Amino acid sequence: MVLKVHVPSAMVHGEVAEGYGPVADAFRRNFARGREIGAACAVYRDGRKVVDLWGGYRDGLTREPWERDTMVPVFSTTKGVSSTAVALLHSRGLLDYDQRVAAYWPEFAAAGKADVTVRQLLSHQAGLAAIDRPLELRDLTGSPALAAALAQQRPAWTPGERHGYHGTSLGWYESELVSRIDPHGRHLGRFFAEEVAAPLGLDFHIGLPEGTDRRRIARMHGFRTWEMMLHITAMPPAFAVAFANPRSLSARAFQNPRMLGVPDNINRPDVQAAEIPAVNGIGQVRSIARLYGEAATGGTGLGLRPWTLAELKSPAQTPSRGLLDQVLRLPTQYSLGYVKPFPAFRFGSASGTAFGTMGLGGSFAFADPDTGVGFAYAMNRTGFHLWDDPREVALRDALFAEVLGEMPQRPDTARARTRRGAGHRRA
């Protein structure tokens, strides 16, 4: 079972700008109610850091404290970070979202994929959620074996007709595409490090560098696969049942290599060192918030151009046969490597221009251009919600509903305000 520990109030640290106190209050309540082992939350607004909170234990077993510079694995919250690197290539005129992937990567055209566009691939519509050829950890960092497995994979459905969460495969497809487009042939991890992280001074890594001080890395306290069935009120029942069947697309999308199907394995040094751009990003939470804060306020420091930001803000293009996710088994919405707001997952302001990604266990980060907000939260005690983990959404609701006067983020809050006929106000 997932570890629970008592965290003294004196172990919750950080600061918030004037007016952002409700976010700090919600952060403290998460610890006071025994929901956290260790966690951090950061918010940038209009280019200024307004929330910077951390607390608890970076390792609940050894009781070592979560420090200001603690880094944490964020699972699929990595996807949005990786897709921002791809967006940078679009801004530089090297990538067209509506071009065929095979125009950049000819081998990709095999097995019925000749007409798949970059937009379809990044929006989880290409039918490539599972990789059939068994992979080993040594294959994952830009190897010819990985490139061949990706290129030879046959789609699970006609690309563009459906979508399904490409849980681990998306990052490898992005990385191989980046290596074909980048004039220096860099794969995504190195490209991100040199072209995104270094210019912005971000402490975030896709493939942990050799020599990293491991005392700075939070230990993830995960759950066993069978425990999902005990939490079907939090995790969609159809997904939990499908995931329990190893032959299902839902299971195969997360279990190649097999070690990736066990959350605790993200703590392994060899897994952290590999390049898995959809899953194994590790870094400071404030670095993720700053990245999204840059994107939310025009992207100048990041190098994003207005035409790219317009693409990221735009509504997702719906698959021709509807929004039922073939992997997660409920309606979802994706665009260009990000999750976009949809009825079951409301985030950011009411316009729907926000974009980001959530991670296994409860982490979430996104940009909201309407308010100029970059938001990030991550923790080391894994929960069971696919999104709207109660700890995370309490922070997000405090920010948007209480501080900014925007759309309520929690489903229960939204329903209550709808019944009262409450209007929204801008800060």
Image (spheres, grey):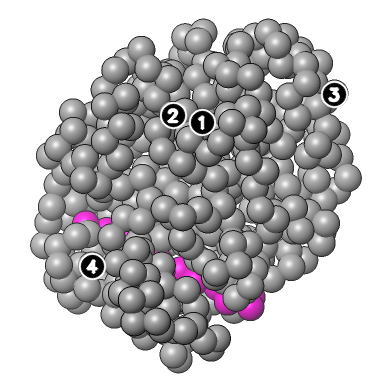
Element class at badge 2: loop
The residue identified by callout 4 is 30
Magenta range is 37-47
Outermost residue toward the bottom in this view: 18
Would you say the residues marked 3 and 1 are in contact, meaning their CB atoms lie under 8 Å apart?
Answer: no
The residue identified by callout 3 is 103
Predominant SS along the magenta part: strand
Quarter-wise, where is residue 177 in the image? top right
The residue identified by callout 1 is 164
Number of on-image labels: 4
Looking at the picture, does residue 407 appear above or below residue 186?
below
Q: Position of residue 296 (x, y in %)?
A: 65, 67
Would you say the residues marked 3 and 4 are in contact, meaning their CB atoms lie under 8 Å apart?
Answer: no
Residue placed most toward the observer, 202 or 316: 316
Query: Residues under labels 3 and 2: Cα distance?
Result: 28 Å
Query: Residues under labels 3 and 4: Cα distance?
Result: 49 Å
What amino acid is at disc 3? Ala
Mark nearest the camera among 3 and 1 is 1
Looking at the picture, does residue 19 appear above or below residue 58?
below
Query: Residues under labels 3 and 1: Cα distance?
Result: 24 Å
Can I make out residue 93 in this image?
A: yes
